[in-house]
Structures are given as structure tokens and as C-alpha cells.
């Protein structure tokens, strides 16, 4: 006797999950922090090498800003908070606080 099988039905639920949009964390230039401060901050917060930190410091100084990272909004916000909490530059008497960083959607 032959076994008869019928095709099964498979239900696939479609969800409308959009991938998270990326965001840039952008460090802004100011005149209240030294290159050494920027390099040290980037090493501690991001684990960047001294050379990469110096290159970013040069970019911030010449262009007025530099993208530090691109990632999910929550991740970028965490790093922004760390920058804003890093404190004043001990090498400059006029340094009253941390550097500023902004978050913008990546295009």
C-alpha cells in the first residue's frame, strides 16, 4: 500500500523590524583643550592608539570637527556621555570642562 502525504502548510509571519539607523558621534573643536588632552581622552574612551588620537586631534583643529565613531544610537550616546564627563584639561588654566560632542544621523 502506498503512503500518501499531503503538502504541509507553513505560516511565515512577517514583522516590520527595521534595522537601526546609524549615527555619527562628532567631536567639536574648541580652544580650551590641548592636543594631549584629546589624545588621552580618545585613548581612554575609545581605546584608540596615540597616533590615531593625534590624527583626530589634528582633524578637529583644522576642520572644526571630526567623526569619532558611527554606530547605534544607544552606543553613540554612551560614548558622548563619557566625553562630556571626562573633565577639564589640567594643562590649560582656562579649561573649565570637558569637550563637546554631538550626535547626528549618518547619511
Image (cartoon, rainbow, N blue to C red):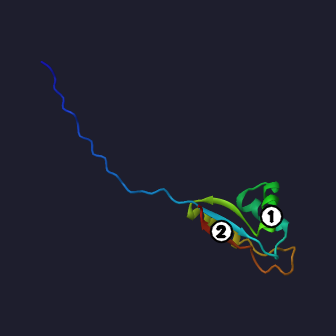
Report the quarter where the N terminus lies.
top left
Percent of width and height locating residue 19: 48, 56
Percent of width and height locating residue 78: 62, 66
CA gap between label 1 and label 2 equals: 16 Å
- Point 77% across, 67% down: residue: 63
Give SS at disc 1.
helix
Whichever of callouts 1 and 2 sits on the residue coming sooner in the sequence is 1
- Point 68% across, 68% down: residue: 82
Front-lying residue, 3 or 28: 28
* Residue 77 visible in the current orientation: no
The residue pinned by badge 1 equals 57
Where is 3 relative to 106, above or below? above
Q: Which mark is residue 80?
A: 2
The answer to the question of whether label 1 and label 2 lie on touching residues, with beta carbons closer than 8 A, is no
Neighbours of disc 1 within 10 Å: few (<14), some (14-19), many (20+): many
Specify the quadrant of the image occupied by residue 79.
bottom right
Left or right position of 3 against 17: left
Labels 1, 2: front one: 1
Percent of width and height locating residue 53: 79, 59
Front-lying residue, 17 or 85: 17
Report the quarter where the C terminus lies.
bottom right
Percent of width and height locating residue 95: 81, 79
Front-lying residue, 107 or 68: 107
Specify the quadrant of the image occupied by residue 64.
bottom right
Give SS at disc 2.
helix
- Point 79% across, 54% down: residue: 49
* Residue 7 visible in the current orientation: yes
- Point 78% across, 61% down: residue: 56
Amino acid at each position: 500500500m502506498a503512503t500518501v502525504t499531503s503538502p504541509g502548510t507553513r505560516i511565515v509571519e512577517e514583522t516590520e523590524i527595521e534595522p537601526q539607523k546609524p549615527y555619527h558621534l562628532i567631536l567639536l573643536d574648541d580652544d580650551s583643550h590641548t592636543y594631549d588632552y584629546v589624545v588621552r581622552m580618545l585613548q581612554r574612551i575609545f581605546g584608540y592608539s596615540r597616533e590615531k588620537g593625534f590624527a583626530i586631534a589634528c582633524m578637529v583643529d583644522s576642520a572644526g570637527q571630526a567623526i569619532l565613531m558611527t554606530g547605534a544610537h544607544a552606543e553613540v550616546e554612551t560614548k558622548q556621555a563619557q566625553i562630556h564627563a571626562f573633565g577639564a584639561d589640567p594643562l590649560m588654566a582656562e579649561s573649565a570642562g570637558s569637550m563637546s560632542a554631538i550626535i547626528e544621523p549618518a547619511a
